[in-house]
Image: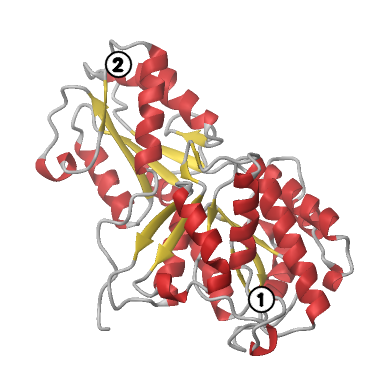
Amino acid sequence: MQLHVREQTTPLLCWVHALVQELVATLAQKGASFVVPFGKDPKVNHGDVGPSVIFDWTVAEALFAVLTNGTAQPTGGSGRLIATIATAKTDVQIPSHRRNTYDELRKMDAVSMEFLDPGWASGAIRRSRQAQLADVLIAISGGEGVEHLAQEFARRGKHVIPLDINLGSSGSDGSGGSAKLFGEALKRPDLFFRVKSPNSGAELLDRTRTSNGTAVHSQTALAIINLIEQLTAPRVFYVRLLNKDHSDYAQVEQFFREIVDPVVKELGLEPHQMGIGVNEFAWMNDAIFQSLHHSEVALVDLTGVRPNCFMELGYALGNTQRVIVTARKGTELPFDPSCLETHMWDPSAPINQRQGELKDHWARNINMPPLVREGGLR
């Protein structure tokens, strides 16, 4: 969740903070996880009192509260409750009045922290990585930063939910932030998010109207949650041996049907495998790379050591997607793939054991950092 505003009247700002607090608490209780930037806590009118002009710490405080009262867990099937992108300056930027929340969240093991290379603190780099880690963007107001983040999510085929409220932007930039995006999404919701048929995306989005802070924030929160629950599930693209004449095919097929499919669905994700389901493309190669590119996760099984599987693995890694690598126990992998942590599944082990082992591997590796860090002139 990426949220930015600039100075506005205190009542409207407080209304948005209340909305964010209720929305985050409810989503966390339903099992959602969050990408949360930690850092400064700028106040309205640049003072030391009053509401913050950003919502990062409101998200953090709401998550700390649900963890403390036991209605949410610090870790889940897809990793820790909070993922954050930090720099060498992050720790010193934590305000004293937020220090306890920050330290306690880390003590609870609720935070997965990834550091940018020293000297790099570009907002664009952070936003690119945030778009890789998250599945849904809820945008409130903002300027160029929010608009760029929305583009990053859309480019990856991920959901963008813009709200209609306009609080301005911290840098007095952009073309209207989420309020402008809200209007565009009403006209072409398919460009922003996908909902389960036969629901109307435009109608569901229209129910989230804040009416410039005059709506009841609890009702707005429920409308947003209802829209989120109607979104299509994040897609997991399967890269695997598909040649039915190959000697390894039967065991690979059994692994995906008995182990991978149940684990993926339990995590609230949608399996996607070529040759299963409706074909939306005329050409197989187009179908493979379009589907792979716009999937939130690529699960790559290297059993059989097939060249096309390595090609698609390389594409997913280069596209900085989330990747899970598996292979049957005993598979001899080439040097480079062998350096990636690979789940080596044993076809002779009990099904429950194999599913549990895949879940453990998934939780450890689903948010691994990109192979290549951002670089260039500093």
Disc sitting over residue 378 in the figure: none
Residue at image coords 72%, 73%: 179
Which quarter of the image is occupied by the N terminus? bottom right
Which of label 2 and label 1 is nearer to you?
Answer: 1
The percent position of residue 212, horizontal first and vertical second, equals 83, 73
- Say if residue 259 shows up in the picture: yes
285 above or below 155?
above
Q: Give the residue number, with chain letter if any, for mark 2.
A: 251
With 35 as the anchor, is 342 left or right in this view? left
Q: Give the residue number, with chain letter if any, for mark 1.
A: 52
Q: Earlier in the sequence, mark 2 or mark 1?
A: 1
The percent position of residue 126, horizontal first and vertical second, equals 42, 69
Which image quadrant is residue 49 in? bottom right
- Say if residue 295 shows up in the picture: no
Helix, strand, or loop for circle 2?
A: helix
Residue at image coords 46%, 68%: 127
The percent position of residue 324, horizontal first and vertical second, equals 34, 39
Which quarter of the image is occupied by the C terminus? bottom left
Q: Amino acid at mark 2?
A: Gln
162 above or below 219?
below
The percent position of residue 258, horizontal first and vertical second, equals 43, 17
Colouring used for the render: secondary structure
Helix, strand, or loop for circle 1?
A: loop
Q: For the residues marked 2 and 1, what is the alpha-carbon distance in whole angstroms?
A: 56 Å
With 151 as the anchor, is 178 left or right in this view? right
Q: Amino acid at mark 1?
A: Ser
Q: Nearer the viewer, residue 266 or 332?
A: 266
Circles 2 and 1: CB atoms closer than 8 Å: no
Residue at the extreme left: 335
